[in-house]
């Protein structure tokens, strides 16, 4: 069997806690496979979880946030018993409760910025076949149904021409899931590009002083590879036709430009956005020449003219209003996870599985106390990570950008889920909790008392 770890930059890196080395090896292999073959990749990820729990149980149990998640789990199970369908409500908790155990383990397993950098490269490598299959699905019409025993089964999960038609979906089966995945990968690639640019700059500056040569940042192989990756990923992201993902990518680019003080880049982005939005919303004499420049695929999607006959029940405003109505009727217990689709169908005769907003979905499903509790737990972790970023340890200062990247990637996930909920997708849900566990793990290591307990 080929050594998959050899594909990963920094593959010879040793875990500071030798008893967790095997768990880290399993985790790296698992996440290399997981986005493409989740049914296979989940096993090494799970093995890493078990080994971490086995070798660091006392450390995991010492973290208060894990106990808060355990209490939240008990409460959510309790309120689920009041759902309109108890079986569906409890089954819906499978999208959350197992990932608390995952978070508890991986926030201990991940202890350094070197691991963050490796994880980012792993996710980029695993995204390549996902994007290639997406292009093949959209342009070569790969996919179709294979009838086995009279039951049609999608080959590789691909839909010829995309799903919905004309929108790239690849192995995620639907464009929304792929869009969230590509947005996350795009941010990680952007962070690695900036990280490589910063480190290449130091090396080139030293070399230029010795040889009196101009600095040539673009000659770095990593920068060349990452530039090509960003171009391909950006194209795939555009082809998902997801306004949420487009907005997330633009915001991420702007944040990194501010982080690096590249104000010229912010000017270019602002000018491009002005042209695009003017082509969509400017009055009639002005928008026609701009629409000759901006593809209809973009401005018609922004204005929603691409789907002019959309029923009222399919609009987000209608779904938000109904979700709020459900919250008002059951503010404490909610209606149970996976109940929204059934209730909304009875109300509007239209099937919509969730209200396209994670806060409204959790509030209408589990009640306001559970939603506020989960937001508080996640918010505390993100706040601690933000404080750590603002006062990064001196010994980690050269890797500050990669930690910043994970913060932005997780923020992008939350932003995306304000208009599209991807919680039911195992891959996206797991990757989001991996980002959060990485942030928390670095925070733990920044505390000297915690660090000594983990590595002893």
Image (cartoon, rainbow, N blue to C red):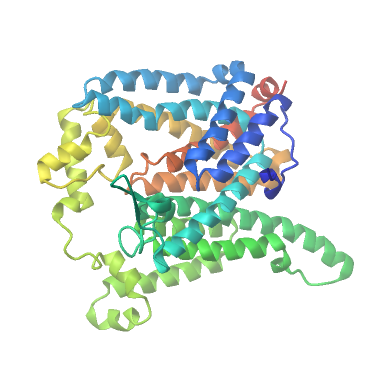
| Outermost residue to the right | 210
Q: Residue at x 27, y 23 (%)?
A: 80
Q: Residue at x 40, y 18 (%)?
A: 71
Q: Nearer the viewer, residue 67 or 286?
A: 67
Q: Is residue 367 visible?
A: no
Where is residue 246? Give x, y as percent: 40, 60
Q: Residue at x 86, y 71 (%)?
A: 212
Q: Residue at x 71, y 47 (%)?
A: 6
Quarter of the view holding residue 224: bottom right
Would you say 329 lies left or right of 187 here?
left
Q: Is residue 388 visible?
A: yes
Would you say 132 lies left or right of 396 here?
left
Quadrant occupied by the C terminus = top right
Where is residue 431? Give x, y as percent: 49, 41
Image label count:
0
Answer above or below: position of 225 versus 95: below
Quadrant occupied by the N terminus = top right
Q: Nearer the viewer, residue 86 or 118?
A: 86
Where is residue 205? Give x, y as percent: 79, 63
Where is residue 129? Give x, y as percent: 53, 56
Would you say 354 lies left or right of 34 here?
left
Answer above or below: position of 347 versus 451: below
């Amino acid at each position: 069997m080929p050594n998959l770890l050899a594909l990963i930059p920094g593959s010879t890196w040793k875990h500071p806690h030798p008893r967790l080395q095997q768990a880290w090896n399993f985790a790296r292999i698992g996440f290399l496979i997981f986005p493409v073959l989740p049914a296979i990749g989940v096993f090494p990820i799970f093995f890493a979880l078990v080994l971490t729990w086995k070798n660091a149980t006392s450390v995991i149990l010492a973290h208060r946030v894990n106990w808060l998640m355990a209490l939240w789990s008990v409460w959510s199970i309790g309120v689920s018993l009041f759902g309109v369908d108890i079986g569906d409500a409890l089954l819906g908790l499978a999208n959350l409760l197992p990932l608390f155990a995952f978070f508890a383990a991986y926030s201990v397993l991940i202890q350094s910025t070197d691991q963050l950098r490796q994880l980012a490269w792993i996710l980029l490598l695993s995204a390549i076949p996902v994007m290639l299959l997406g292009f093949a699905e959209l342009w070569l019409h790969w996919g179709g149904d294979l009838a086995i025993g009279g039951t049609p089964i999608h080959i590789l999960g691909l839909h010829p021409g995309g799903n919905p038609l004309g929108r790239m979906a690849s192995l995620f089966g639907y464009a929304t899931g792929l869009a969230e995945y590509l947005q996350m990968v795009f941010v990680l690639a952007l962070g690695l590009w900036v990280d490589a640019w910063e480190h290449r700059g130091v090396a080139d500056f030293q070399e230029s002083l010795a040889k009196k040569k101009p600095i040539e940042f673009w000659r770095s192989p990593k920068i060349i590879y990452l530039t090509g990756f960003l171009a391909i990923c950006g194209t795939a992201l555009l082809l998902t036709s997801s306004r949420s993902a487009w907005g997330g990518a633009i915001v991420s680019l702007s944040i990194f430009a501010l982080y690096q003080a590249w104000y010229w880049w912010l000017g270019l982005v602002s000018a491009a956005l002005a042209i695009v939005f003017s082509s969509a919303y400017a009055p009639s004499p002005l928008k026609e020449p701009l629409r000759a420049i901006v593809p209809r695929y973009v401005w018609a999607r922004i204005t929603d003219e691409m789907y002019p006959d959309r029923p009222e029940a399919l609009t987000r405003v209608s779904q938000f209003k109904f979700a709020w109505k459900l919250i008002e009727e059951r503010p404490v217990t909610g209606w149970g996870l996976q109940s929204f689709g059934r209730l909304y169908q009875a109300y509007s005769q239209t099937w919509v599985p969730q209200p396209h907003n994670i806060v409204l979905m959790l509030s209408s499903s589990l009640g306001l106390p559970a939603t506020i509790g989960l937001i508080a737990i996640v918010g505390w972790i993100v706040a601690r990570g933000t404080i750590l970023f603002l006062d990064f340890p001196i010994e980690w200062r050269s890797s500050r950008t990669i930690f910043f990247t994970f913060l932005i990637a997780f923020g992008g996930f939350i932003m995306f889920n304000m208009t599209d909920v991807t919680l039911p997708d195992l891959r996206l849900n797991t990757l989001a909790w991996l980002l959060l566990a990485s942030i928390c793990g670095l925070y733990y290591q920044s505390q000297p008392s915690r660090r000594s307990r983990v590595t002893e």
